[in-house]
Amino acid sequence: MLSAHGDVFAPNITPPNSPENELQARLAASLSEKRLSGLPALHVVGHSFGGQVALELALLRPDLVSRLTLLCTRDTPFPAFAATADAVAAGAVDVDSSLQRWFGPDEINRNGHAVRYARRALGDAPRASWASALRAIATFDCSDRTPSISCPVTVIAAEHDAVSDVVAMEAMHRRLARSTFVVLPHAWHMSIFCEPGRLHALLQNRSA
C-alpha cells in the first residue's frame, strides 16, 4: 500500500485458514490505526488472492482507500481450484507445475529473483494455509458489490494468465465505475514481478 507521502506498507495479514473477508477486517484495523496517526487514505495494491482482499477492503472501508491497483485477480469464482485445494491438502504438491502457470518459459529458464523466491515460498508453504487460500479463490464472488466501489481503480491483466484471465478481468473492469484496464502482453500470472521498474511505473499510473 502506498501513501500520499510515498511510504509503502506491506502488512502481514495472512494467518492460516482465513478467508478474504477476515483478512480485510484485520487489514482495516491495521490501516485505521495508521489513519489515527495522521496518514491519509492509501493506494491499495493487491495481486491474485491479495487483490481479492483489496476488493473486500475497499467495499468494507472506502474511507481508507484513495485508489486501487488490482493485479491478476478476479471478483468472480474459479471453481477448478477446489480440486487443487484437496490435492494440496492431501500432500500432492507440484511446485514445477505452479511455476509454469505463474511464469513464462524464458522467465523460468533465467531463474531470476522472482522465480527463485516463488519456488522457495512454495516449498516452505504450510499446506493447510495453501489449500485454504485455493478454496477461498474457488468460491470468492463480490461481483454484485464491485459496482459500488467509487475510487479510481487500475485493473492489470496478464495475457497468458489462465486463472485471472483477460476475459474475467475485463468484465470486472467494466463493473467498476472509475477503472482503467491494462493488459500486459506476453505475460503470465507473476511475470510483472520479474520487471520491478515496469511494475513501479504501473503503480505510479505511468506507461511502461
Image (spheres, rainbow, N blue to C red):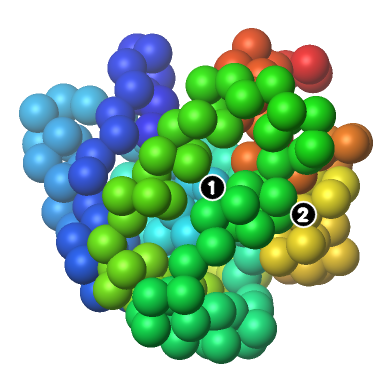
Q: Which of label 1 and label 2 is nearer to you?
A: 2
Residue shown at 29% from the left, 29% from the top: 9
Horizontal side of residue 46 vs 30, given as left or right: right
131 or 75: which is nearer to us?
131
Classed neighbour count for the residue bearing mark 1: other residues with Cα under 10 Å, few (<14), some (14–19), many (≥20): some
Q: Which residue is mark 1?
A: 47
Q: What is the number of the mark on residue 89?
A: none
Residue 183 found in image quarter: top right
Percent of width and height locating residue 62: 40, 55
What's the distance in space between the residues labelled 1 and 2, CA to CA? 12 Å
Q: Which residue is mark 2?
A: 161
Residue shown at 48% from the left, 82% from the top: 87
Whether residue 109 is visible here, answered yes or no, is yes
Percent of width and height locating residue 77: 62, 81
| Residue type at numbered disc 1 | His
Considering only vertical position in the picture, is 112 above or below 138? above
